[in-house]
Amino acid sequence: MVRGWFLAGLAALAASLLPHGALAASVEMPPALTVSGVPAVPASLMEQAKPYLEYRSARLLGWHPVRRSVLIGARLEDGRQLYEVPAPGAAPRQLTFGEEPVVAGEFAPVSGDVTLALADRQGDEQYQIFRVDDGHMVSLTGEDGRNLGIRWTADGKRIGYSTTRRTGLDTDLHIMDPRDPATDRLVMEGRGGGWSFADFSEDGKRALLYNYISVAISRLFEINLETRVLRALVPPTAEPFAFGSARYAPGGRILAITDFGAEQRYLAEIDRVTGLPRRLNPETDWAVEDFRIDPEGRFLAYVVNENGLSRLRLLDLATGRIRAAPALPGGILTGLSIAPWGEVGFSLTTAASPGDVWSFDPDRLELTRWTESGADLPPGVEPEIVTVKSFDGLTVSGLLYRPDASRFPGPRPLVMVFHGGPEGQSRPGFLGRSNHMVNELGVALFFPNVRGSTGYGKRFVALDDGPFRREDAVRDVGAFLKRLRHDSGIDRTRMAVSGASYGGYMTLAALIRYPKDFRAGVSIVGISDFVTFLEGTGEYRRDLRRLEYGDERDPAERRKLKAISPLTKVKRIRAPLLVVTGANDPRVPPSEADQIVAALRAQGGTAWHVVAADEGHGFEKKPNADYQFLATVLFWQRYLLGTAPDAVASR
């Protein structure tokens, strides 16, 4: 096994953040960043955090059908690119060299003669599909629209994809041979932003289509690609239901993940006559989140989300019985993929290690490790699950990462970190740079899953819907605070909050509702005013967000959205705030950050602001992300720990 292969060239990357000269007093900002109110970041902080800035991870994207290699997405330099790993433990071969991060990739089935890549421009999320020709990325979709959801036909001759380039709002479905972009043709004009291909039949004459309406409502259709006749596979009912993945199985069977008639999502076969799903997996307490079918139809592999941990299962398709599967460490499994010869591959990240690619033979069950990205990294910390009853009796939980008590005795400061979404879930994966907070600064990190989070059933995820129930999620924070205040390992006088996107809203809302508990906050691409957010978010996703938050066009809902917006209550924020903004963010407009920063400063408050001209909904490029993290550590040192060195200068 090649150890530490992801760490090549790291010294040069670290040096890129420093000005010329080994004794530089402060970290140099990347050229794309503009900061205000932020003191200069001491170079010593960079040196202390360096081991935590250099972690890498590998994400399995697929198998090469001829060479039996794997395609992975990884960031070995400044941004994520595509790499081919020819054999377990072998050094990766770089396939793409673009300036922008590549978010997905595909090998053509059967022949493997085409490699596709998906990338946007500086975080604008206007994704284009590229063919990779000898390291060069050739656009197949031009420069317009948002192009996503690549699905290959079984023979590897065509792809289906979704695009918004016709109207900028509606999602249409197209098919093309990627070897010749002139073959591109429209299959269906969609209405709204949620249409995508799920799978193609073996003969390529039919396709499964997925229409996402909200986290609670989605529909599954089948289309005849010759006649373009569309039919719904599962009839609507009074109770909302949704689908996850859907695929054709050998013999024309249709398998899908759904919560039809159930609280948790399960694996089902769709009856072609009645349209009713029939459960295939035995688990009922936790949700199935992904599955793949063996090409020969012997078995399928599926993943269960068990209180945030991924559990891998194998199901024999002939008998319907569960087969033996390899035992995996507790963590998060993604990128599930079955090779044409039946080998099962996946990526696994745990609290102790970043993501790596693994595989196993379904008969022998011996695990094979393809990549090893965390060999030289400081260890991560395993979390504990904290469960409490909220104000209305609802059970909510979160993950608590504690510093080593032998190194950091006594009560420790804590940062509460909210996930985005709100249809998301904090899960026990690798903390990355944040391990520095726990290991070196002795700061405890707590990741709550307030109501509205996924992973706990469809009733739970709907409990914060609309403007009139939105603040119930903020009240959940009070239940966690009550528990944490009485934890002997937590310093109740030194607590803070942080979050990104919807988590940024939760950060601001928590500072407003619990001003005596939280000393500081960090809001990353966060919402400050629901009305201006809804009016400014990408047109293709506005209706989706209205279903979640409320409709700003309705007078009553508009008044409530304004009333619960942090900007409306900004005078209640007395704590210092660090705000992080991507100038090209299509989801949360940069103006959301600008207005909360301006309002805080106008009332004499402290607001640090970091803006990246070449980023969108979060910082993807390593120099930007590293600087953001170092500025955040300096912020916590100053306003949470009280240990920050004197600033060299202010920017």
Image (cartoon, rainbow, N blue to C red):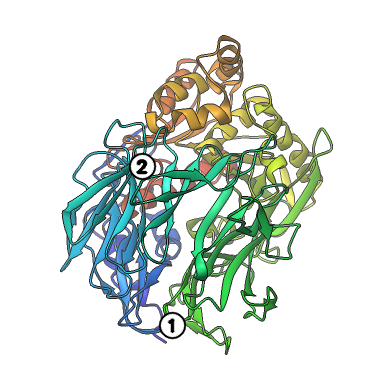
- Is 385 left or right of 334, judged from the image as shown? right
Q: Is residue 76 visible?
A: no
- Which picture quadrant has residue 469? top right
Picture residue at 78% right of the left edge, 50% below the top: 387
Q: Residue at x 36, y 36 (%)?
A: 585
**574 left or right of 337?**
right
Q: Nearer the viewer, residue 78 or 326?
A: 326
Compared across the picture, whether 14 is left or right of 406 comes to: left
From the top left corner, tell me how far across and down residue 416 is, in percent: 63, 44
Dot 1, how many residues are within 10 Å of its Cα: few (below 14), some (14-19), or many (20+)? few
Check whether the beta carbons of the residues at disc 1 and disc 2 lie within 8 A of each other.
no
Please state the horizontal and vertical placement of residue 234, each as a whole percent of the image.
59, 46
State the image coordinates of residue 628 (x, y, percent, origin top left). Answer: 40, 46
**Position of residue 441 in the picture relative to residue 13 (left or right):** right
Closer-to-camera residue (589/195)? 195
The answer to whether residue 472 is visible is yes
- Using the numbered discs, state the Cα–Cα distance from disc 1 to disc 2 in whole angstroms: 55 Å
Name the residue that disc number 1 marks.
Answer: 341
User: SS for tag 1?
Assistant: loop
Q: Which residue occupies the extreme top position in the image?
A: 555
Residue position marked by numbered label 2 in the rendering? 40
Q: Residue at x 48, y 57 (%)?
A: 433
Residue 315, relative to residue 33: is it above or below?
below
Give me the residue at 40% from left, 32% from top. 191
Label 2 element class: loop
